[in-house]
Amino acid sequence: MPALWRSLLVVLLALVAAGCARGPDEAGLRADVQARLDALFGRQVLVLRDLRRQGSAPYAAADDGTRQAIVYFNGTLDFSEPYDPTDWQGLNPQLIATALGATDRGVVGLGAGPMAPGSQLRAYGSVIYRREDDGWRAALPAASPSAVVPMPGVPTGRSGTDELIQRLAKLVDTSPGLNEAQRQQIVTEELDRALQNIQLRLDSGATRVVVATGPAGGEYARFVSSVTARLTQKQAIEVAYTEGSVANAFLVDRGKARFALVQSDVA
């Protein structure tokens, strides 16, 4: 009889634990993280080799009132092909961190220089999930996990930046005629371009000098690289890769670049 009671108790505890669980299991979480990275790059460039689920917590309800939860993980990843974070046409490292639900410091091993195939990263990230029927569906990458528990003394009102992020999330989530991969690709390209422009504007008042060169690997870009390689204070030069001379001229005209290489017929 005592053995029967112990068995019933074990079953009840298992049911309670399952009822309290938030988000998918480790296998489901792993699949969602890899799918998010594949959508970001448009192919499998960053491969998730190892993932460990590190628990979950309640998250702020969605705009439509849907219950949400945030699931934390530690993971090891490596690149299956070369990746250069300085490439103007490539993906900004901040987008990788956002896709992983991590801060910049939460991605270890992603430096400022090119990454060769096999280069390894460690990520301390998270995924936000929406409760739908009897399951959980991954939501769009969250911009600020701090919404889970507001810090004491910190205003709860959203800034203009937060408002824009919320509008972007709603726009992407409701865009008709596009599947998730197509939506992610459009957002990735436009956000990367916006981040580059933001960086240029922030740098315009700093000590660094921004030089617009045209496409990465082009004749102008190689010329500027050869010049900056001979400078003693290389950190003072910021190279901006663009589509060409017209874009270079616009950057100078708008105050986003100090110098630019432009063809004579364009100037």
Image: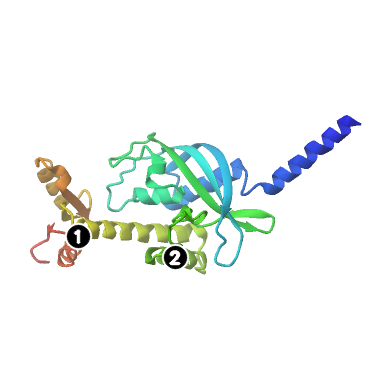
Say left or right for 38 vs 13: left
Q: Residues within 10 Å of mark 1 (few under 14, many from 20)?
A: some
Amino acid type shown at disc 1:
Gly
Report how far apart the C-alphas of labels 1 and 2 lie in the structure. 42 Å
Residue lying at 78% horizontally and 36% vertically, measured from the top left: 10
Amino acid type shown at disc 2:
Gly
Say left or right for 265 vs 114: left
Frontmost residue, 241 versus 168: 168
Is residue 42 in sight in this rendering?
Answer: no
Residue lying at 60% horizontally and 45% vertically, measured from the top left: 28
Q: Position of residue 230 (x, y in %)?
A: 9, 40
Q: Position of residue 144 (x, y in %)?
A: 45, 55
Q: Position of residue 139 (x, y in %)?
A: 54, 57
User: Image quarter for residue 254?
Assistant: bottom left
Disc 1 designates what residue?
244
Q: Which mark is residue 157?
A: 2
